[in-house]
Image (spheres, rainbow, N blue to C red):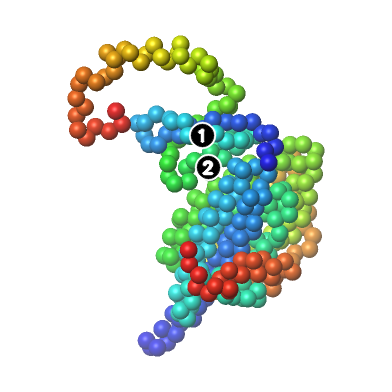
Amino acid sequence: MSEASSSAASASSALVAEYALQLGDDALILSHRLSEWCAHSPELEEDVALANLALDLLGQARTLLTYAGSLEGAGRSEDDLAFLRTEREFRNVLLVEQPNGDFAVTIARQLYFATYQSELYAALCESTDPELAALAAKAVKEVAYHRDHAVQWTLRLGDGTAESHRRMQAALEQLWPYTAELFLADAVASELVASGVAVDPRTLRPAWEASVAGVIEAATLTMPADVWQPRGGRAGKHGEGFGLLLGEMQALHRQYPGARW
Amino acid sequence: MSTGLPLWEVFIRGRRGLSHQHVGSVHASDAEMALRNARDLYTRRGEGVSIWVVPAASVSASSPDEKEPFFDPAADKVYRHPTFYRVPEGVKNL
């Protein structure tokens, strides 16, 4: 019996590891995208703001990847997971890997994703997994600020000049298709919902949509219509630009394995 | 690289019971964004519990040319300095 229960426990810890990897990869890849703005932002102040968001996300990614590595039990550290996996092994949703585009595209991506993360972490605070609950309790405050940052900019760009309105609307429409994947329940999440470890992504959609719609309306913009719905990020199927992103993110660690500050 | 956004002076209160101190300035389109920029620039290491931002254009400053009439007369009035009593040990923020 002890053998059976320990194998059940290891099966479930493999699933939790996979779940932590999904959330950790989301944070890691978005953090990297935001860090690409360093020294390229329209204002020095915004440069610091975006770098701050990136650092918050990197902190979440470190906790989650470290946890995933420890559950996996194969001795992989956060660095091994971040820098030595290949494209197909990353579990992030497609939204977070989308290129920065102009500033409006970055803000649209932030609005969609930070609102999703706010809902996700608020629910994950109640997780039966103490590590995930603790991470969520800390991160929920960080992403509330990320959401606020995106909301403030969406309002100003949408209700700003004719050009900023046009760009913000185009950005919302460009990224809208990728939001559907946020609320798909894959096998990992579905398995873990019953035991209260994971949040069912489908339950997050109504609050997310109400929140995003409110901001878009207040910004005098229009909610995008549903068109195609690309998916596959959770299964390791990523876009063309993802290899370049990993190339840049992993180059240093691959050239100088084990490099430390 | 500046796009000419207005300048705001930033004041931070380190903790309860202290007054707000001037810490620097930020560019921002309006007061709400100035508060957020100030949060990101000046409270990264837990420095503050409260932030004020004030349009830099609203600050009236003394002129360096007036330095002598403004400040020199105070220099020789030693009796104005609180140097004639002891400060008890352990008193902070006096």
Question: Are dots 1 and 2 in contact, CB under 8 Å?
Answer: yes
* Residue at figure coordinates x 53%, y 38% from the top left: B38
Relative to residue B39, is residue A247 depicted above or below? below
What x and y, as percent, mark residue A212? 66, 49
Mark 1, chain letter?
Answer: B
Residue in view at x 29 percent, y 15 percent: B78
**Left or right: B87 in relation to A15:** left
User: Callout 1: 10 Å neighbours few (<14), some, many (20+)?
Assistant: some
Q: Indicate the position of residue A91 as horizontal and vertical percent values.
A: 61, 71
Residue hosting label 1: B24
The amino acid marked with disc number 2 is Leu
The three-letter amino acid code for the residue at tag 1 is Gly
Q: Chain of mark 2?
A: B
Q: Is residue A187 above or below residue A230?
A: below
From the viewer's perspective, is B65 left or right of B83? right
Q: Residue at x 70, y 37 (%)?
A: B3
Quadrant where the C terminus of chain B sits is: top left
- Crowding near pointer 2: few (<14 within 10 Å), some, many (20+)? some
Q: Nearer the viewer, residue A9 or A59?
A: A59
Residue placed under numbered mark 2 in the picture: B41
Residue B46: quadrant of the picture: top left
Give the structural element (helix, strand or loop) at label 2.
helix
Mark 1 and mark 2, same subunit? yes
Q: Quadrant of residue A239?
A: bottom right
Number of numbered callouts drawn: 2
